Amino acid sequence: MDDILYFAIACSSNMNRSMEAHAFLVKKGFKVKSFGTGEKVKLPGTSADKPNCYEFGVPYDDIYKDLLEKDKAYYTQNGLLHMLDRNRRIKPCPERFQASTERFDVIITCEERVYDQVTEWFVSRRSTSNQPVHIVNIDIQDNHEEATLGAFLITDLVTKMSQSEDLDNDIDELLHDFEAECRRPILNSIMFY
Amino acid sequence: MSNKYQPTSKAFAEKQLIQWINEAGMSEGNKKAGLLRKIIEVLMHQLSSLIPLYMENVLKFVNDKTTEVRKIVVGFIEQLSTKHPENIPIIISQLQLLVIDSVIAVQKKAIQAASVVYKNAIIWICKDNSEDAVKLVWDHISKLKLLVLNLIDSENEGIRTHAIKFLEEVVLVQTPCAEGNGGLNLDDIPSSYSFVDRQALEEEAEHIFKLLQKFHNSQHISSVNLMTCMTSLISISKLRPKYLVRVVQALGDLHTTLPPTLSQSQVNSVRKHLKMQLINLVRQTTSNEIIPQLMQLLSDIGMTQQEINKVVPKEKRNKRFFEVISGEIPAKRLRMDSPQNSQSSDSNSRTEFDDDSQSSKSSQPTEDSFFEGLNNIENVLNLVMHTLTNHLPNEMPSSFLTLYKPIPNSGSILQKRNLAKMINSLIKGEQEPSPTPLTDLAAKIPLLSEDDEKLTLKNAVAKLQESTKADRQAEPLESAVSKLMEETRQDFLKEEERKAKEKEKEQEKLIPPQTPTVPRLKQKVKLLKLQEITRPIPKEIKERLMIQAVARILHAEKDAAIGGAAQIRAKLIAIFASGFTADIRELVLNYILEDPVSRIDLGLQWLYEEYAFMQGFNRHPITLQPKVHEKYDMNYSQLLCSLIVQICERGEPLLENSKDILLRRIYAEAPLVSEEAVDYLKHLISEDKSAVLALDIIEELCTLRPPRAHKYVAALVCHVLHPNVEIREIALNSSLKLYKNGSEAVKKVIEKHALLYLGFITLLTPPAELVEGRHTVRVWTDDMYKLCLNLVMAIFTENEEVLIDVARVYGCAGADAKRCVLRVVEAPLRAAVADVPAFSPPPPGSNPPPLPSIPRAFAPLLQDCPRGAETLLTRLVHILTEKSPPTPELVSRVRELYATRVSDVRFLIPVLNGLTKREILAALPKLIKLNPVVVKEVFNKLLGLTNPNNENLPVSPEDLLVALHLIDPNKADLKFIIKATAICFAEKQTYTQDVVSEVLQRLAEEPETPVLMMRSVLQALTLYPALGSLALNILQLLINREVWTNKVAWEGWVKCCERLGPRAAPVLAALPPHALPSLPPHLACTLPPQVGTR
């Protein structure tokens, strides 16, 4: 069982991008978890200056009901309710990456800021077991369409990584090829648990 | 409850455990792995007391054939070492086996576990244990270290990654740490055991650190390992501040010389990683001493001052000033080591600096005095001048070129400090025996110049260093090769060492080392890594090789044809030529031009390739430099033009013959004929070089490429003004041909040109197009006018509608121009009129066809004649009516115009026969006043002489003659009338005796005798003497009218009588007596006497 790579997908709120990819990957049978790296779970509100903020750990279901109550028509129309509905069927609540104690083989981030937060978290700790983890960033804009496109890309990447006999050895080349294929800049680094 | 339940559950668990162990022994693969997991789980968490008992049952699977199982064993060992370190002596030997496992995944896991086990083992040693056990473990971990150390050169990047992390752990553990928070460190290792030599350990750590540092700055490191190494170095520097300075320097070096093998995004990733690590380092308290260097580095990697200020705590920043002033050692050392300052001492290796720095304390005072000296400008000036005149070599050493870098922030206090230090060390160095100058290589390898008295691999390195040094001095090899040699040697020596140690161990009969020698030897062979022994080929050499390769392909023409690879070869060449450097383009182009006749296909293929790039059908290869890349559409055009121009202008006799075909092919087959290429054709024509060919090609282009024909046709049409008749004729003919068959757009272009040139004739002086280089004085000549008109006249035959434009221009043109236009327009007009079939005369006897209408194109001109163009219109009407009677439509138009615009009676002439009798008679007085020739023509028309078949004359000859006689002499001079009548009488065919007699009769019947009547009677008599009787009647009639009262008529009467002679006697006799006196005497005497008696 150890042979199967353990993936983590991280975006800032563990709502849209990471969950979209999470949904894709779970369907394909990968071992995957998703996370947010922000301070709070932030969702767009009825105006730009009034976002809906929740703590990590508040169930998707609760958020769903909260928004339903606040403005059903609006949140139906902008797709948030649909998204939350999908999310609550995948896992109970948004999770914060920094709070996770699990050890992954690969962490894929959806935004440079998220990538920074993840790497910073690693840099600030001292590795104990020296177990390596690859961190890869693919920039995905935070909207429904891009999230879907991004999920395809991530699925591609994850499939490639899983097919690799020896990921540690192949990662440079694999990412280089993938970058040429998806035509987006890729960041990657290696960290240790 | 638990108390009561525990013993039973434990027993149960043990039973279960035993069952699993048994099962595991019999099962295979994944099932075995699953069972093992369960066994370990139970052992670790539930039955930890039974570990010593059952441990072996798990460890025995270390040689299992299933990878997964071996990995689980590694995991078990790792867990055991952490949770139950008392078992370390047993497990540590197993781990060694796993580290050199044949499966990479197991190896990696083992190395990772080794770092944990290593640390745990040291911790275990620190506790009080039996010396034998400690010695055993110690030997094993020493061996483990060596094993992993060798793996850093593995060809598997993952293994390298893990090895780096392991070595990081080793360095951390084996380095003393002054502060308390450094975790396990050298000071914790008990020195009570005889086999533990702290100093040796520390030196080993130092060496490993240098190894890491070297690895970090090597040119062939993968980006992941580079980042791993960076992380390791930084975490070492964080926990062991003594390495801080060197780490920061290594990071700085890395920033300036990133491995060339990294792709752009890898570079980005690495830079980002570096930045993050540096920021993290800045925040550490240990980094306080080198904050200025860190801040410099941060700004080097592109952070702005604000960003840096944000990152660096304020109190640290303030330290900076203090630091620079006091010139602390770390700062200096950093500067010393950087190659930037090596210009004055490029023969010194890095290690020598290290030696110097150790003694820096003792040299402090002198160094300060140097520093002060450097602040004095005069001193510095003298020093520099002296050096320039006395110590500068005549030729620049080649090493200088590669090593020298401009000094950043020169003149700073820091730099002066460094200079002072260098001068100091230089002066000191002179007192000692001068150091053996090393090649530049020495500076690159930090592992050299260590003391010989070192442990294990230290020894090896030292020996190695000596030998390589000797080698290097003997024969300076390519650096990459010698580096490789050095590494192989090092490895070999290490191997020897290890074997020797193994033998010792065997003698001691302790746990026999299970390291098989074969994989180790394999390892040695594996070390020949292409990546390591090769270095990126310099760009120039690469390009040269590339060109040579292409040249070889080019020269293999015959071979390729024989081998059936001609197609592929052509494709290859085309790709090379289009996708690579300008040099290759030139090479291929020259090749094609050497023998264009047979290689034109290749050229065309290349053209298509370029075209594909231009249109974006092909993705641009990365090899295209961005600069070339941007103007890729120019590549196509350039190639096309150079092919054409070269073929045209090479002037080789051989080529001359085939030039025609080649050019035609290029123009016909190129995917796109660019404007420049068309311009070149124009140039050919204007230079009179192969003009005919060029014209031909343009025409071909127009017909073969209809969508762009309207662009090409302009190049053709403009030559209808060409001074050379031949060219002009061809251009004209081609234009006309294209005009006939071309699209609307083409027609429009030609028309536009035609009208433009037509318009020229209204200008006062001929425009530049016409006189270019031909006439110094710009004066119109008839030829020039004709030139301007030729095109419009040519297309007139196709499109008569241009006539109205001609008329419009004609209206504005000068007299000379008008004359020319009239002359030129004649033939086409006639042709146009003749083309209308209905104008042919109807065959006699058939029903008259419906009257033909005016050609459609002329209608607008007739309807709305431009001012000044009336003469042209007249000419047109003339031509229209020349062969056939005017149509009623035309007549009515003309009539209208005559009434409103054209007062000239000549205008009516062509349609005379279409007018009513009354109109004709009204115009008659004016008509007869015209030029006699015209008058003659008018009469011809009126009398139907020009068109003998026409029966329907509006005015009968009789009427005409009568009308002439009846013209009021006030309106027209008698002279004209006489002439007109004379014309009539001359037409004997028409004015037969009968006609004339009728005319005379009608004249006689006129109430008032017309002035010319008698004259006409006389003429009639001359023509037709038989009319005598009629004349007598007239004379008789006139007597009744008292002819003698009218002087003119009387004269005529008398003359008539004279002519008639004796026959007139009765008339004379009839004269009343009172008229007789007026009778001339000779007539009077003829009177019969009897009359006189009456």
Image (cartoon, coloured by chain):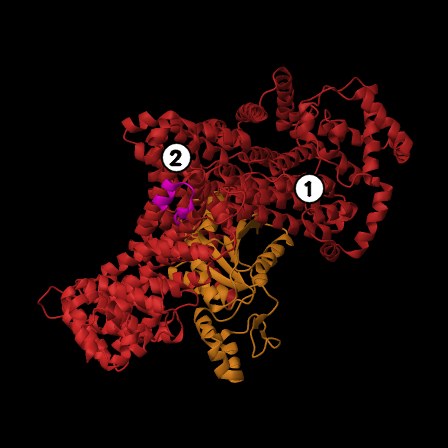
Q: Nearer the viewer, residue B49 or B1010?
A: B1010
User: Please, which chain is the residue tagged with disc 1 on?
Assistant: B
Which of the 4 quarters of the picture holds residue B857? bottom left
Q: How many marks?
A: 2
Image side of residue A27 versus residue B176, left or right = left
Q: Which mark is residue B573?
A: 2
Residue B382 seen by the camera: yes
Q: Which chain is orange?
A: A
Three-letter amino acid code at the position of disc 2: Ile
Q: Which residue is mark 1?
A: B252
Q: Which residues are magenta?
A: B715-731
Residue at 55 percent of width and 43 percent of height: B223
Where residue B534 sits in the image (x, y, percent)?
52, 30
Image side of residue B419 versus residue B561, left or right = right
Three-letter amino acid code at the position of disc 1: Gly
Q: Main secondary structure of the magenta part?
A: helix
Q: Which mark is residue B196?
A: none
Where residue B103 sits in the image (x, y, percent)?
43, 39
Task: Answer yes or no: are tags 1 and 2 on the same subunit.
Answer: yes
Quadrant of the snapshot with the C terminus of chain B: bottom left
First of labels 1, 2 by sequence position: 1
Camera-side mark, 1 or 2: 2
